[in-house]
Amino acid sequence: MAAQLPAQAGALPDFVLRQFDPASGDPDHRQLYRILQSGIRTAVLPAGLKLPPSRAMAQALGIARNTVVHVYEQLALEGYVQAGVGRGTFVAAVGPRLAGFAGLAAQPLQPARRAALSSRGSQLVEQAGAAPLQWGAFAPGVPEVRMFPSQVWNRLQAQVWRAATPQQMSYATGHGDAGLREAIATYLQGTRGVVCTPEQVVVTSGTQQSLQLVAQLLADPGDTVWLEDPGYWGARSVFRALGLKLEPVAVDAEGLAPSAAQLRAPPRAMFVSPSHQYPTGALMSHGRRRQLLEYAAAQGAWVVEDDYDSEFRYGARPLPALQGLDDKGRVIYLGTFSKTLFPALRLAYLVLPPELVDSFARALNELFREGQTLQQAVLARFLAEGHYATHIRRMRAVYGARHDALIAAIAQQFGSQLPVIGGDAGLHLVLGLPQALDDRAVVQKVLRAGVATRPLSMYYMRSPAPAKGLLLGYGAVREEEIAGYFALLARAVQGFL
Ligand SMILES: Cc1ncc(COP(=O)(O)O)c(C=O)c1O
């Protein structure tokens, strides 16, 4: 618990002190930034309020003064506070400008509701990573949903509904549609080198739900989970919300790279994206895969493999899944239809070691009830009749062309001034920015120009973030529109260089 602020430190509502948790595992600067930013957005910290001097704030929270200075500077850059030399730092009047581009930003929570949240609920909301804008240039991770073959889907849906049984429309057992489990197993064996039977597949309503099951069934609160750093904020949020201790592990060109000290303290589970590291795009090398599996088997740790978008690789063929190399039953394989079809479908799956299947199905049934049972049957037909493979082939060509157009636009605007990271697979790439640059401020500015991106620094748990950049998705923008949108973005970025 943080100390009380000294009286001369200026007014600061209790909620800042109450929310700041030095033991949370989240970097100090990120916590403080989020607490202050959300307080200002929700007007709990009203316009004109004077923030305590950085030294007093640092003392009260027991953190470095530089951290507070950095947070104040970032808030000033984004217009949340105004700093006058010698006068102090004051909360700015935050108008609709900061409510987000075209009103699409997340709606701030009402203060009354915020006050009612538990401390872990507050933490979840404060540290949420989901983007307010989920469509358009250059929203990362979003596929081209306008090209989804909805006529085929409609036809299959009508067939399924004509023959719908009471069992299909009632509560199910938690394993998933039998036809879909079979189609998924066939697909994974043929394209991803996954070694499994249909009985090892459990269908869920999204990777987020798969992760909840993994965390609740394979770890207890307080157990350590290794997370790639930078890494997927969605996994971070689920594991944190369920009380796991998050250990950020660096990623190099060969994938997850734990330090010697980290290797001496084995985790309960490690979350990795070996086929296309999120967000850097690194492909885990064969040697690293073997080391990781051997280590996991020796330590009795689980390897949670997130294989979310490896269908889209533009140069070489996709590398098979890590799961196929595992002969000790330590890998939990996660797949999703969010990238290959469309995110709102909310269908995903786990491939589990056989002895875990029934426990996962039972827990899924117990906690969530199985979802989308008739949609699962439609999807089973969509896969079995070859429409899925056709759609992926078609989209690979579309994304390949968009990827090339974006690379060309970057070269035209910046030459080789800014590096492109991880640009040969998936639905996004990272445009590197100089380390001294505040990539969050760039994202805010670009958003005002009508372009959605995400700052690389938000994917890091370590502070300060070891690299800066912008995640640029090319799934949700037409090839012919890419140069124009990128020119808008480039103009905004130039202002910072
Ligand atoms: C790294 C990563 N894994 C998985 C997913 C898919 O999540 P879901 O299946 O819940 O849509 C995403 C979506 O953004 C992602 O970025």
Image (cartoon, helix red, strand yellow):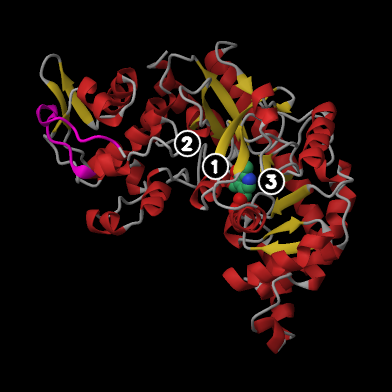
Q: Which kind of residue does numbered mark 2 sit on?
A: Gly
Snapshot quadrant of residue 411: top right
Left or right: where 38 falls relative to 476: left
Nearer-N-terminus badge (3/2):
2
- The count of marks equals 3
Q: Is residue 144 visible?
A: no
Ligand 1 within 8 angstroms of badge 2 C-beta: no
Mark 2 Cα within 10 Å, few/some/many (few <14, many 20+)? some
Q: Which mark is residue 245?
A: 1
Snapshot quadrant of residue 225: top right
* Residue at 64%, 67% in the rendered image: 364
Asked if residue 45 lies in the magenta stretch, the reply is no
Mark 1 Cα within 10 Å, few/some/many (few <14, many 20+)? some
**Residue position for label 2:** 25
Q: Quick check: 352 above or below 245?
A: below
Q: Nearer the viewer, residue 496 or 230?
A: 230
Tell me, yes or no, whether the two marked residues, 2 and 1, touch with CB atoms within 8 Å. Answer: yes
Q: Nearer the viewer, residue 260 or 413?
A: 260
Part of the protein shown in magenta = 2-14
Q: Distance between the residues labelled 1 and 3?
A: 24 Å
**Residue position for label 3:** 308
* Residue at 31%, 40% in the rendered image: 1
Could you tell me residue 272's position as x and y percent?
Answer: 69, 39
Q: Which kind of residue does numbered mark 1 sit on?
A: Lys
Q: Which kind of residue does numbered mark 3 sit on?
A: Tyr
Of the two numbered discs 3 and 2 in the rendering, the one whose residue sits closer to the viewer: 2
Q: Is residue 358 visible?
A: yes
